[in-house]
Amino acid sequence: MIGIMSDSHDNITAVRQAVSLFNSVGCELVLHAGDFVAPFSAKEFGRLSCPVKAVFGNCDGEKKGLEKILRPFGEIRPEPFSFRFREVHILLTHLPFSNSDHAEAGNHDILVFGHTHKPEIRRDKGTLLINPGETGGWVSGSKTVAVLNPADMDVEIISL
């Protein structure tokens, strides 16, 4: 299982709920699509039973601090961050896709993004696009994450 979240915006309570959920379902990897905001909130990811891979969002100002906090249990990079997990090719970014250029290229099985604070799951020419919504819940009032089974590409948006 892969846990997916974005836009946690320093909501420690929501981050703790997400970490607990991801641990309880046995996630082997957690993706964060940006906007932790401050390094203190990223410390909570040290409680995960798996590594975290993340990208910087437009509200992540303390990049060096985030890198330092996440280094022992994961990594954070500028977007776009392309990597493989098992046999699945993933592209992780913060900003949404204005068109399907990435999907048309056919280079990725999954594209994960955030920023809009709106959950979205769709397919574009065989590529699975996922926005888990906002974990922080400050904008929409709804705190959401996603859980993906990479074996069958089944994904579910979960309210915290």
Image (cartoon, helix red, strand yellow):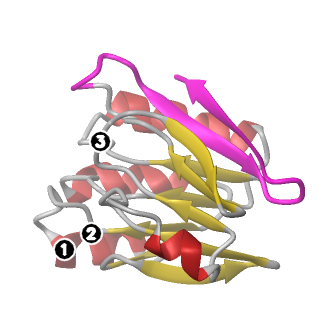
Q: How far apart are marks 2 and 3 (CA)?
A: 22 Å
Q: Which mark is residue 63?
A: 1
Q: Mark 3 points at which residue?
A: 116
CB-based contact (under 8 Å), mark 1 and mark 2 = yes
Magenta region includes residue 151: yes
Name the residue type under label 3: Thr
> Of tags 2 and 3, which is closer to the observer?
3
Q: Mark 2 points at which residue?
A: 66
How crowded is the residue under tag 3: few (<14 C-alpha within 10 Å), some, or many (20+)?
some
Name the residue type under label 2: Leu
Label 1 secondary element: helix
Instruction: Please say whether residue 73 is visible from this viewpoint.
Output: no
The residue closer to the viewer here, 96 or 76, is 96
Residue at 10% in and 65% down: 61
Label 3 secondary element: loop
Q: Which of marks 2 and 3 is nearer the N terminus?
A: 2
Residue that protrudes farthest toward the top in the picture? 141
